[in-house]
Image: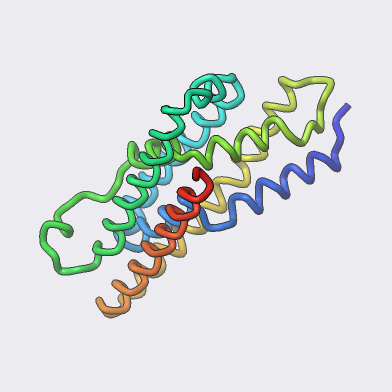
Amino acid sequence: MLDLILAFEFAAAVFFLLITPGPGVLTTAGVGSGFGYRPGLIFLCGLFVGTNLVALAVVSGLAATVLAVEEVRTVLVFGSAGYLLYLAFRIAFSGSKIAFIEKQAPPGFMGGVLLQFINPKAYAVNTALFFGFAFYADNLLAETAIKFAIINVIWVPIHLLWLFMGVTLHRLDLKPRTLNAINICMALSMLVVVGLTALSAA
């Protein structure tokens, strides 16, 4: 029998997990601010696909099997931290006058997919969401399908909002010094996420 209260609690948990700054939303805003709407939207589409692939891996049990190997977990942690450092660097200097940075392309569709694929937090969050909040215990398949729907219905507008905020900063025609400062702040926020990831893995 469907427990509507637990379903609502599940939706609330999804909302607060997604609205809180993390690798996905910070990178989305940073790409929007540093490179504009179109590159940000392409990156966001990749992030969306990556998020759902990770969720499918968690639900199928594949993630648990793979992550049971300590070496794989270590590679994911360092890979995630390294990729976030790379994106932070790109965002921080996207508005600068350094030629070799300006000529580089923004992280694209595959960049978004990769970010979720190597992000240990994505696996942990999906495990908590899909294996907790049993609001339809009599029909696990239906519950899983409903959870996918709820997560995506909340995920899309939240990430579009972060992209909009980033693009708005990009379109305000701010002075280069101001735009650079904003990009650097976003990059520093991502560095904080890297630090927290490293602490959680220690």
Q: Quadrant of residue 83?
A: top left
Left or right of 184 in this view: 117: right
Residue 15 placement (x, y as % from top left)? 66, 51
Residue visible at 48% across and 49% down? 197
Q: Nearer the viewer, residue 153 or 120?
A: 120
Q: Nearer the viewer, residue 84 or 100?
A: 84
Residue 187 placement (x, y as % from top left)? 36, 62
Q: Is residue 147 above or below residue 137?
A: below
Left or right of 100 in this view: 167: right
Residue 136 in view in this figure: yes
Residue 75 placement (x, y as % from top left)? 38, 33
Residue visible at 33% across and 68% down? 184
Q: Quadrant of residue 192?
A: bottom left
* Residue most extreme to the left: 99
What colour scheme has been applied to the protein in the rendered image?
Answer: rainbow
* Residue most extreme to the front: 202
